[in-house]
Amino acid sequence: MSEEPCQCPDCQRFYREHDRLIRENPSLRQQQELNWAALQSFRTLAGRVLEELQKQYGDSETTVPAPAEPTNADTADEPDAMQQAMADLENINAHLFSIEALMERIFDVRVPEEVEQKFREVAGELAPDPLNADRLRLNRLLHQTPDLPDHRP
Ligand SMILES: [Zn+2]
């Protein structure tokens, strides 16, 4: 008895993206490059946004928001929300930095062409079709969900 994967729009978008990343990056080398680029772009963008917010609203470490007093909510909420957002972004950046250190070990690995060929074979089996049409069709029948917008070229 196998559990059917969730078919909500978010999950379906995830399945398609997941399969696309396998299909378009079917070797170890390509997965390494893809994930390194994804990590670095995430760090660059989140880091720059944090810098901009700190310039605009002050550093979240130095300006600890005072305990909330029962004042006008419209003026009181936004600075707190921004301080919280900056603290969240700082956490994200710290985690991304740790992930980068871990990933460097993954990216040092090189494998023989034979193994890369095995990657390509398995990738072809896992993600053979651009929209994984068979799976989507089957799930559509099983769940009688409305047709998805079809982006097939
Ligand atoms: Zn879902």
Image (spheres, rainbow, N blue to C red):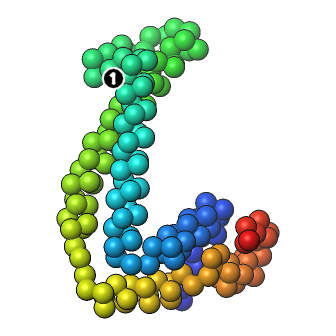
> Amino acid type of disc 1?
Ser
**Residue 129 on image: x %, y %:** 62, 82
Tell me if residue 40 can be seen: yes
Location of mark 1 (residue)? 60
**Residue 53 on image: x %, y %:** 42, 24
Tell me if residue 139 can be seen: no
Front residue of this view, candidates 36 and 88: 36
Q: Is residue 98 above or below residue 89?
A: below
The quadrant of the image that shows the C terminus is: bottom right
- The answer to which quarter of the image holds residue 73 is top right
Query: Which residue is at a point 42% across and 17% down the rendered structure image?
Result: 57
Q: Is residue 75 above or below residue 110?
A: above
Front residue of this view, candidates 5 and 130: 130
Q: Determine whether, in the image, residue 121 is placed left or right of residue 99.
A: right
Furthest residue in direction top, as rendered? 71
The quadrant of the image that shows the N terminus is: bottom right
Front residue of this view, candidates 131 and 135: 131
Q: Determine whether, in the image, residue 133 is placed left or right of residue 105.
A: right
**Residue 4 on image: x %, y %:** 58, 79
Say what secondary structure mark 1 lies in. loop
- Circle 1 packing at 10 Å, graded few (<14), some (14-19), many (20+), is some
Query: Which residue is at a point 54% across and 81% down the rendered structure image?
Result: 127
State yes or no: Cβ of the residue under disc 1 lies below 8 Å from any atom of ligand 1: no
Front residue of this view, candidates 84 and 29: 29
- The answer to which quarter of the image holds residue 62 is top left
Query: Which residue is at a point 55% across and 66% down the rendered structure image?
Result: 17
